[in-house]
């Protein structure tokens, strides 16, 4: 179970980071590492908050 969550964390971070980097490179002409990492980190936090709420709602039958 722990390895599954770790895999999801790493895969989600990599996916968000690559998407942010591609967006910044295409539309802004540059992709600062700080912007890529901070945005990907915020997206992963949002992903896990959403998963937490989904599990809480499923546990309470809503």
Image (cartoon, rainbow, N blue to C red):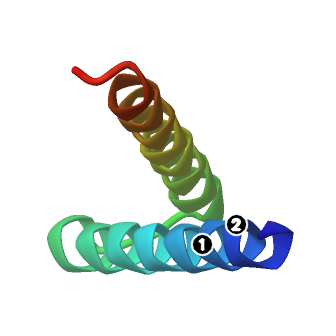
- Which quarter of the figure is the C terminus placed in? top left
Q: Which mark is residue 5?
A: 2
Q: Residues within 10 Å of mark 2 (few under 14, many from 20)?
A: few
Q: Residues within 10 Å of mark 1 (few under 14, many from 20)?
A: some
> Disc 2, disc 1: CB below 8 Å?
yes
Left or right: residue 1 compared with residue 51: right
Q: Is residue 19 above or below residue 47?
A: below
**At 34% across and 24% down in the image, what residue appears?**
57
Residue 47: horizontal and vertical position, in percent? 44, 47
Quarter where residue 29 is shown: bottom left
At mark 1, the secondary structure is helix
> Disc 1 designates what residue?
8
**At 60% across and 72% down in the image, what residue appears?**
8
8 or 59, nearer to the observer: 59
Residue 37: horizontal and vertical position, in percent? 62, 57
- Which quarter of the figure is the N terminus placed in? bottom right
Q: Is residue 40 above or below residue 33?
A: above
Q: Which mark is residue 29?
A: none
Residue 39: horizontal and vertical position, in percent? 48, 48
**At 51% across and 70% down in the image, what residue appears?**
12
């Amino acid at each position: 179970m722990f390895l599954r969550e770790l895999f999801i964390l790493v895969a989600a971070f990599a996916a968000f980071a690559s998407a942010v980097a591609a967006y910044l490179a295409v539309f802004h002409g540059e992709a600062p590492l700080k912007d890529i990492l901070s945005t990907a980190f915020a997206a992963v936090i949002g992903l896990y908050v959403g998963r937490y709420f989904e599990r809480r709602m499923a546990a309470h039958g809503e």
